[in-house]
Image (tube, helix red, strand yellow):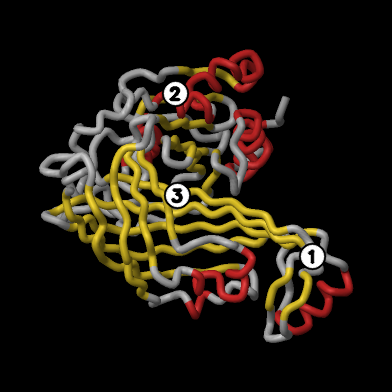
Amino acid sequence: MPKFEEMNETDVREAIVRPLLTRLGYEHGTEAGIRTEQTFRYERAFLGRKNPKKDPPLVGRADYILEVASYGRWVVEVKAPSEELTRDVIEQAHTYAAHPEVAALFFLVTNGKNFRLYRTSSLDEPIMAWAYEETDELLMALGNIVGPQAIKRKVTLLAADPGKPLGVGIASVVEIIGGHVRYEDHESNHPLFRAQDINGLELPITGGRVSRSPDGRLHAQVQVAKAAPLMGELSELLERADGYDFYASDEFISTDRDRPTILQHFYEHRVPPGTTISLLGLGRFPLPFGFRIAALSEAIGFVEGDRFSGTMQLSYDFAFEEMHPMIRAQLEAKLGRFPAVSRAKGGGTFEVKLLSL
């Protein structure tokens, strides 16, 4: 039993909440991912122009955002054991869960000693409420509500209807005929990820299509020209085309800027040692180490006229595997220290021009 009287909020996050999330099936850099530093592109409760007095800026950020890419997400708000789970705490967590850039299905508030799980659509009564010592007994029931497979099951969409409109005034299939993406605010803790080459970069969208996938989700196939520069010299390791498949569990594409559609693209790839590449201007040679990457891209927007526009969030987790200590030392001497966990994140804006078929 934890000594709650000696714990602070950070202790609760790391010693109680994070192990619980792992047991539920969430892990950083996977399709069922954990976000701990969500920065909103718009730090108010609505995306449209609102009266600042009625739409005050958000203070702080959600402790954890758990998401199953393109299916749904939920939020955890952590407090110290000395804090009670008051109505103000619940409303604060609800503000993050209901924010249009999150659109969470559920949110959980806890001080380590007690837990309360709510639907974002209802604050009247928690779905579940339990004490720490009851966690093991109720873990299966909790997983049946917010576990990755449960989140997928929440998307109770019918089989795709080819004639079903994608949204108000939007045909069942639309062609993407142009547009652009602009990358901003990228940063990384790894020297091979050159954020200065990315920030301010604007790339044309060259084509694609929006329709419904066989399971009924919205599906946007997007072609972006010259997407490779995003990872600099790491790009050759990705072996991918400049196409992206985004999905959303919404029934229709939003035409309301205050309730945007969240489309997500999850990508993971591994390159084994020995793969021939060109790196650091040293010519082509077999890669003396392995490389893996997991990346999540979000497009958060709405349709107005023939344009789908909004903001985007991107996060990358990558690692160099089976690297000989001597090679690591040589690379670090040239580039700088390699972190134990390599991450990058950024944002930006986009505009897509649509043509109904």
Q: Is residue 148 above or below residue 48?
A: above
Label 1 CA crowd tier, 10 Å (few <14, some 14–19, many 20+): few
Q: CA distance from mark 1 to mark 3?
A: 29 Å
> What number is the disc on residue 102?
none
Of helix, strand and loop, which one carries label 3?
strand
Q: Are marks 1 and 2 in contact (CB under 8 Å)?
A: no
Residue 295: x percent and y percent?
54, 54
Q: Residue 330: image x %, image y %?
A: 82, 80
The residue that mark 3 highlights is 265
Mark 3 closeness class: few <14, some 14–19, many ≥20 residues within 10 Å: many
**According to the image, label 2 marks what residue?**
153
Disc 3 residue type?
A: His
From this view, report whether residue 186 is shown above or below residue 312: below
Can residue 128 be seen? yes
Other residues around mark 2 within 10 Å, as few (<14) / some (14–19) / many (≥20): few
Q: Amino acid at mark 1?
A: Gly
- What is the C-alpha distance between the residues marked 1 and 2? 41 Å
Residue at 79% of width from left, 65% of height from top? 274
Q: Position of residue 286 (x, y in %)?
A: 78, 71
Please determine whether, in this image, residue 53 is positioned above or below residue 287: above
- Mark 3 and mark 2: Cα distance apart in space: 19 Å
Mark 2 residue element: helix
Q: Quadrant of residue 306?
A: bottom left
Local SS, label 1: loop
Percent x, y of residue 223? 37, 61
Residue 95, can we see it?
no
Q: Residue at x 34, y 67 (%)?
A: 181
User: Residue at horizontal 82%, vertical 60%?
Assistant: 322
In the displayed structure, 144 sits above or below 43; it is: above
Q: Judge left or right: residue 69 versus residue 261.
A: right
Amino acid carrying label 2: it is Arg
